[in-house]
């Protein structure tokens, strides 16, 4: 594994500046960014007779194919979510140009803001969350319920998908769900619900996602079965005795196709061969 954060930071810094992202948002996001490349065919290390570590690599070329993984903990971009989506797309584009990289994955806390309409009471918030489709943001509007304002998530996801990328977690799903209590020492906000689509995996379209799990509760608990009366979104409040974190875990199984990489390696090898032939012919003519 190799840390390549510093290799990409200058370009990404300039990109955010060109997008007009607020300096404090850009600086915090970049400071918490980590980008690494990982050899896909590294199967361990063995000590040779000389005491040196030897690597076992795949047989698809001289350069071991690598996966670039970027982990983000973004400062909230608020209404600049489209620029944030463009930033993620730029990161994937630039990381994919690194030597040997066959694909790039961006993961982490995007910190997308999903506010309630002004003056929505805690009671209406709770009722709206409980009435919504399981795992999804409230969208219904009527007596005692209201939809959440999800414009920022929509802007982010639209920009990402238009860039030829895919989001593992649909923008209709939330990945955080918390409720203020009296222990927050803000009496006027007791019972208020904060929910957001924050945790995300962004991948190129040619990576096939075979399975996705958004974890945050105990499936073995009979009170949380699909037929249980209390099995609503309000049963997912974080943290809980079953889930001590304040974000759900987003896990995906991804099939990475190496056919493009193999073709590229073969093309490079063929080009190198013909270059060598031309050099040899040129040297022969010179003699």
Image: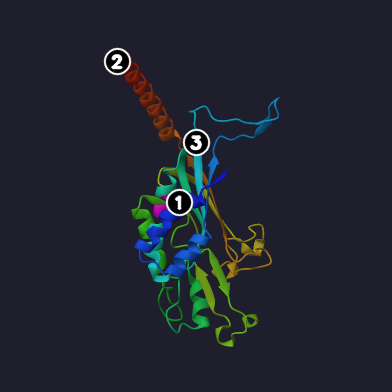
Looking at the magenta stretch, what is its main secondary structure? helix
Of circles 1 and 3, the one toward us is 1
- Residue at the disc numbered 2: 286
Quadrant position of the N terminus in the picture: top right
Q: Position of residue 193 (x, y in %)?
A: 54, 76
Residue placed at 40% from the left, 32% from the top? 264
Taking the image as shown, residue 18 lies to the left or right of residue 43, namely left
Give residue 116's mark: none
Circles 1, 2 touching at the beta carbon (< 8 Å): no
Residue on which the image places disc 3: 65
Relative to 61, residue 245 above or below: below
- Percent across and percent down for residue 214 are 55, 57
**Going by the picture, which residue comes out furthest to the front?**
287
- Res 246 quadrant in image: bottom right
Report helix, strand or loop for mark 1: helix
Residue at the image position 43 percent from the left and 61 percent from the top: 171
**Does the magenta segment cover residue 214?**
no
Q: Are marks 2 and 3 in contact (CB under 8 Å)?
A: no
Question: What distance separates the C-alpha of mark 1 from that of mark 2?
Answer: 44 Å
Q: Which residue is mark 1?
A: 8
Marks 2 and 3 sit apart, C-alpha to C-alpha, by 39 Å
Which range is magenta?
A: 88-92
């Amino acid at each position: 594994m190799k840390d390549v954060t510093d290799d990409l930071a200058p370009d990404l810094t300039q990109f955010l500046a060109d997008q007009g992202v607020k300096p404090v948002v850009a600086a915090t996001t970049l400071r918490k960014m980590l980008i690494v490349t990982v050899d896909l065919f590294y199967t361990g290390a063995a000590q040779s007779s000389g005491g040196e570590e030897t690597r076992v690599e795949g047989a698809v070329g001289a350069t071991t194919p690598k996966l670039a993984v970027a982990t983000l903990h973004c400062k909230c971009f608020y209404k600049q979510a489209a620029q944030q989506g463009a930033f993620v797309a730029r990161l994937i584009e630039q990381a994919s140009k690194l030597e040997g990289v066959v694909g790039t994955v961006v993961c982490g806390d995007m910190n997308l803001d999903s506010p309630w309409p002004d003056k929505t009471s805690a009671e209406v918030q709770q009722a709206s969350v409980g009435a919504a489709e399981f795992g999804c943001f409230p969208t219904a509007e009527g007596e005692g319920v209201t939809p959440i304002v999800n414009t920022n998530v929509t802007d982010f996801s639209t920009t990402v998908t238009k860039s030829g990328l895919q989001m593992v977690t649909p923008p209709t799903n939330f990945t955080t769900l918390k409720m203020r209590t009296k222990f927050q020492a803000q009496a006027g906000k007791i019972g208020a619900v904060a929910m957001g689509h924050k945790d995300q995996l962004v991948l190129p379209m040619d990576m096939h996602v075979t399975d996705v799990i958004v974890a945050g509760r105990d499936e073995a608990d009979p009170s949380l079965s699909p037929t249980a009366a209390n099995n609503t979104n309000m049963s997912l409040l974080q943290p809980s005795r079953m889930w001590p974190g304040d974000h759900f875990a987003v896990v995906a199984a991804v099939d990475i196709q190496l056919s493009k990489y193999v073709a590229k390696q073969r093309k490079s090898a063929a080009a190198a061969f013909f270059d060598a032939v031309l050099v040899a012919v040129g040297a022969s003519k010179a003699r």
